[in-house]
Image: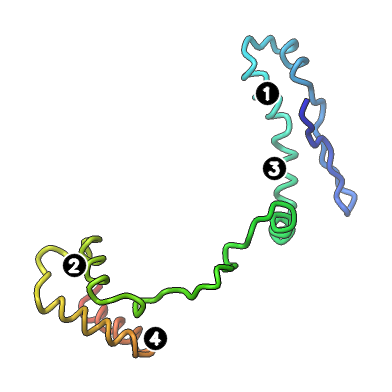
Amino acid sequence: MEKKIVKVIYTDGEQDEVKDWKTIEEIKTVFYYDADWKANRHFERQFYKIEKDILWNLYDDNVKDYAKDHLDLKDEDDNDCDCDDKDVSDFEDDEIMAELSRRKLFGYTNVNIITVDLFTRFSRIITVADNKDLETIILDLEKKYNL
């Protein structure tokens, strides 16, 4: 039989426990279940409240530390690949244009020599401009065109 937590005592003395819990065999006899899955589901439901209470009272940091120390999991923000994050300047113009086209971000009616030139020019600006300046320019354009 698998092990289950049936009682928890917190540091402040508060207790949570499963009252009158029954084994699967007892459940089968008392409730006359004809299928094992019904008895197993009834058995598992006995522990629902205490499991929920235990999880509710855990601190996020404790769970993260346990996962790192005992399960060899990593924080999603940790980057151990020793590689720099890529930005748009790492790609050639034609690669960017091909990706925009593949994702259909051009739209079908506006793809012409002017828009291609605009993207090329804008990609050059992105590589040298300050992020605050770019944000200001884009916000002004969005306001102007009600986007």
Residue named by callout 2: 106
From the viewer's perspective, is 52 left or right of 78? right
SS under mark 3: helix
Q: What residue type is labelled 1?
A: His
Q: How crowded is mark 4: few (under 14 residues within 10 Å), some or many (20 or more)?
A: few
- Residues at marks 3 and 1, CA–CA distance in whole angstroms: 16 Å
Quadrant that contains the N terminus: top right
Q: Is residue 80 left or right of residue 99?
A: right
For marks 3 and 1 on the same chain, the one whose residue lies earlier in the sequence: 1
* N-term-proximal mark, 1 vs 2: 1
Q: How far apart are marks 1 and 2 (CA)?
A: 56 Å
Q: Nearer the viewer's eye, disc 4 or disc 1? A: 4
Q: What element carries label 4?
A: helix
Q: Is residue 15 above or below residue 30?
A: below
Name which quarter of the figure residue 102 lies in. bottom left
Amino acid bearing label 3: Lys
Q: Is mark 1 on a helix, strand or loop?
A: helix
Read off the residue under disc 4.
131
- Mark 4 / mark 3, whichever is N-terminal: 3
Q: Along the polypeptide, which appears first: circle 2 or circle 3?
A: 3
Q: 93 left or right of 54? A: left
Residue that numbered label 3 is attached to: 52
Decide which of tag 4 and tag 2 comes sooner along the chain: 2
Residue at the spot x=76%, y=15% of the render? 25
Residue where numbered disc 1 is placed: 42
In the rendered image, the quadrant that contains the C terminus is: bottom left
